[in-house]
Amino acid sequence: MTPFFYKRAASEIQCDEAEAAYYLGYKKINPPGDDVAGLIHKNCLKMQPVLVPQAVYAEYELSVGEDETVSFADVLFRSKDLARNLRNCRKVVLFAATIGAQADMIIRRAQISGSADAAVMQGCGAMFIESFVDLLNDEIRKNAETRKMRSHPRFSPGYGDVPLTMQKEFFRLLPCEKIGLSLMDTLIMAPEKSVTAFIGLE
């Protein structure tokens, strides 16, 4: 299938400081104090300009069997959770998205220096990649709607009973290297602030 590439300017990625606090373990009923909130604000402003948000995705014909088998492209495997997510879908989109290596770099620099900002930057990075993926998700949803199709919630390898080894299929089927994304032997992606996921189209 023909892959599509999706890019946004760093300034277009929403900076949601409350979401960054959530990734640091804070809840709405227990928000961070002024000191931590100040660190979140400072590090969001520091990280946003270096973002290089890019994604690649492709759409495949899909078959979901009664025995919970999921089949697309030349891939066939069994997953109760993904089969449930993709129920009634005729197509599936596979995507890989990243906010770029620079975000990882400034996190590593903070970690090496022992800076208190390091943990906060991790939360900011998680927030920014999710914000970018939300934009990509909207793009895929709108495209589906023009064809009278409805998109299902995205589902990533490593969640539920979908093994992280499924990452290998994403990297085999999608030209992830063209957005600067690679898969290590540990199945961890580089840059780290990256996401792969399925989106079913019903």
Image (spheres, rainbow, N blue to C red):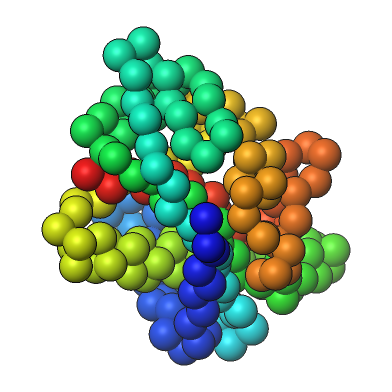
Q: Is residue 32 left or right of residue 138?
A: right
Task: Give the percent coordinates (x, y) of residue 25.
Answer: 45, 48
Quarter assignment of residue 39: bottom right
Q: Residue at x 78, y 37 (%)?
A: 186
Name the residue rendered at 54%, 50% in the picture.
Answer: 196
Above or below, 155 relative to 71: below
Tell me what residue is drawn at x 26 percent, y 30 percent: 87
Give x and y (percent) for residue 33.
40, 64
Residue 59, relative to residue 38: is it above or below? Answer: above
Residue 10 seen: yes
From the viewer's side, name the closer residue of 31 and 139.
139
Q: Tell which residue pokes out farthest to the left in this image.
A: 148
Q: Is residue 102 above or below residue 150?
A: below
Residue 35 makes an appearance in the image: no
Residue 147 shown left or right of residue 166 in the figure? left
Q: Position of residue 2 (x, y in %)?
A: 53, 62
Query: Which residue is painted at 82% across and 39% down in the image?
Result: 185
Which of 110/3 is in front?
A: 3
